[in-house]
Amino acid sequence: MSNIVNNIKEKVTGKHDSSDASKQNKEEEEQTFTIQPHPAKTNDPRDLQPSLGGGLNTNPEVGAFHAREPYIPPSQITDNLPPPQSREELRARAQELNKE
């Protein structure tokens, strides 16, 4: 019965039981190991980080979080801004919006 099961298993997996000759070949072959080079060129850990250009870095809206200097709007934008409101005006506006 087990012979039938083994035959079916061999046909399905495509593997055959290893014979004495193949076992001897495996024992005769010597394992070889190689040393792989380290990917870093310097001692700087930033060299191992992936390069920019994928994921969130491709979205220009997220690029604002990587800005180096403060944003100074052009004069045409600053000229069209309304004057800042006082605290009393802001509190009155908040009460007006929170009535409901």
Image: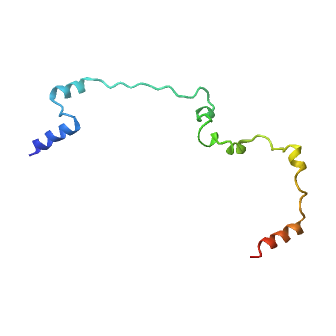
| Residue located 68% across and 42% down the image | 60
Q: Using residue 23 as the reference point, say whether residue 72 is left or right of it.
A: right
Q: Using residue 20 as the reference point, say whether residue 71 is left or right of it.
A: right
**Vertical position of residue 89 compared to residue 39: above or below:** below
Q: Using residue 11 as the reference point, say whether residue 91 is left or right of it.
A: right
Q: Looking at the rendering, which quadrant does residue 83 occupy?
A: bottom right
| Residue located 62% across and 36% down the image | 53
Report the quarter where the C terminus lies. bottom right
**Vertical position of residue 53 compared to residue 80: above or below:** above
State the image coordinates of residue 8 (x, y, percent, origin top left).
16, 41
| Residue located 30% across and 24% down the image | 30
Q: Looking at the rendering, which quadrant does residue 26 occupy?
A: top left
Q: How many marks?
A: 0
State the image coordinates of residue 42 (x, y, percent, origin top left).
61, 27
State the image coordinates of residue 64 (x, y, percent, origin top left).
72, 44
Q: How was this image coloured?
A: rainbow
| Residue located 38% across and 26% down the image | 33
Q: Camera-side residue: 4 or 45?
A: 4
Q: Which residue of the protein is positioned furthest toward the left in this rendering?
A: 1
Q: Looking at the rendering, which quadrant does residue 91 occupy?
A: bottom right
